[in-house]
Amino acid sequence: MDTLDKARRKRPFKLDDNPDAQAVIRQLTIRERVRSILEQHPEARNSDGYLFWLYARKYLGLNLPRLTFAQLRGLNFDSVRRARQYIQHGGQGELLPTDPTVVSQRGKKRHTMNQLYG
C-alpha cells in the first residue's frame, strides 16, 4: 500500500462529494512529501524555510538557491507549511521540532493566537 492510500484512510473523502477532488489529492500528496522530508531531515522540523528549500529541491527539481521569479511563484509555500503543521499538531503530534527554542517560540505564538482568536 502506498503512502497516498494511507493518507486517504487517515482523512477519508469521497471524490463525488468534493467539487475539487484533484485539489484534495494534491494536498494529500504534499502532506506525504512533507512527512518524508521531516522524517529524513530532523532539522527541517525547526525551520519552514529549510523545509521549503528541501521540498523545492527534492520534489520540484529546482536547483536552489538560483531561482527565476516564475519558479519562485510556482512554489506553494503555504501548502508545505500547512502540511508541516498538520503532521506536527493536527495529526498525531508526530515529527515534532527538535530545537527547544523553536518549541518554546511556537508555543508562545500559539498561546497568543488562541488568546486573540479563541
Image: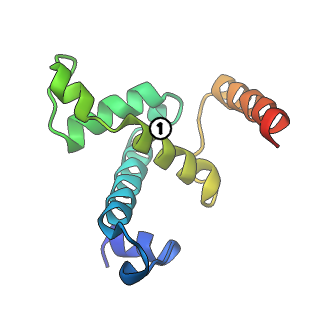
Mark count: 1
Q: In the picture shown, does residue 56 fall above or below 20?
A: above
User: Which quadrant would the C terminus be assigned to in this image?
Assistant: top right
- The foreground one among 102 and 111 is 111
Q: Which residue is mark 1?
A: 42
Residue shown at 14% from the left, 37% from the top: 61
Q: Position of residue 82 (x, y in %)?
A: 50, 45
Q: In the picture shown, does residue 99 fall above or below 93?
A: above
- Image quadrant in which you'd find residue 20: bottom left
Please give left or right for residue 25 compared with residue 65 in the image.
right
Residue shown at 56% from the left, 45% from the top: 85
Residue type highlighted by circle 1? Pro
Q: What colour-coding does the image apply?
A: rainbow
Q: Position of residue 45 (x, y in %)?
A: 51, 36
Please give left or right for residue 50 compared with residue 57 in the image.
right
Q: Position of residue 114 (x, y in %)?
A: 80, 39
User: Which quadrant would the N terminus be assigned to in this image?
Assistant: bottom left
Q: Position of residue 93 (x, y in %)?
A: 64, 54
Q: In the picture shown, does residue 116 fall above or below 9?
A: above
Please give left or right for residue 10 compared with residue 5 in the image.
right
SS for dot 1: helix
Residue shown at 59% from the left, 48% from the top: 88
